[in-house]
Amino acid sequence: MMGRGHNARDVLLNKVVVLERGFIGVVLRGQRVDEHGRTMRELDIPAALEFERQFFLNDPAYHDITDRLGVPYLQCTLSIQLTEHILKCLPDLKRELQERHRNLAKEVSEYSKSA
């Protein structure tokens, strides 16, 4: 939460607290009012996303880093990270399932022999 005249540029540029994946700024749907006097809570999702886009484009502190800010960029970044994590986990999952399959096949074979 920031008041007028303040910005989070240095934080978003990973200069204050360094995070491996950095920061992604978004405009929350809170008290902020658009040019028609509507609060962000009163806007539908597309209107809120456009408001956020315009906010970053028109603010001198953010206009040159707009491509790395906002909910759509956050969504894309999280999707990529999730995909990478799933791909990283798949080989272990495959090995585990194959091992379970072998154990169950062995167990079924033992039951067949005793019957």
Image (cartoon, rainbow, N blue to C red):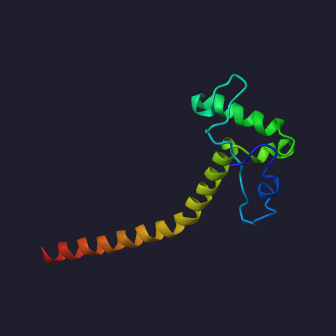
**Nearer-the-camera pick, 75 or 65:** 65
Quadrant position of the C terminus in the picture: bottom left
Q: Is residue 64 left or right of residue 77?
A: right
The picture places residue 51, in percent across and down from the top left corner, at 71, 32
Q: Indicate the position of residue 105 as horizontal and vertical percent values.
A: 30, 70
Q: Is residue 54 toward the left or the right of residue 28 in the image?
A: right
For residue 96, above or below residue 9 = below
Q: Quadrant of residue 96?
A: bottom left
Query: On the rendered structure, is 44 left or right of 103?
Result: right
21 to the left or right of 102: right
Q: Tell which of 96 and 47 is nearer to you.
A: 47
| Residue depicted at x 70% and y 31% | 50
Q: Position of residue 71 (x, y in %)?
A: 66, 43
Give the residue drawn at x 66%, y 47%: 76
Residue 101 at x, y = what percent?
Answer: 36, 68
Residue at x-position 54% and y-position 65%? 89
Q: Is residue 110 above or below residue 7?
A: below
Residue situated in front as seen by the camera: 42 or 115? 42
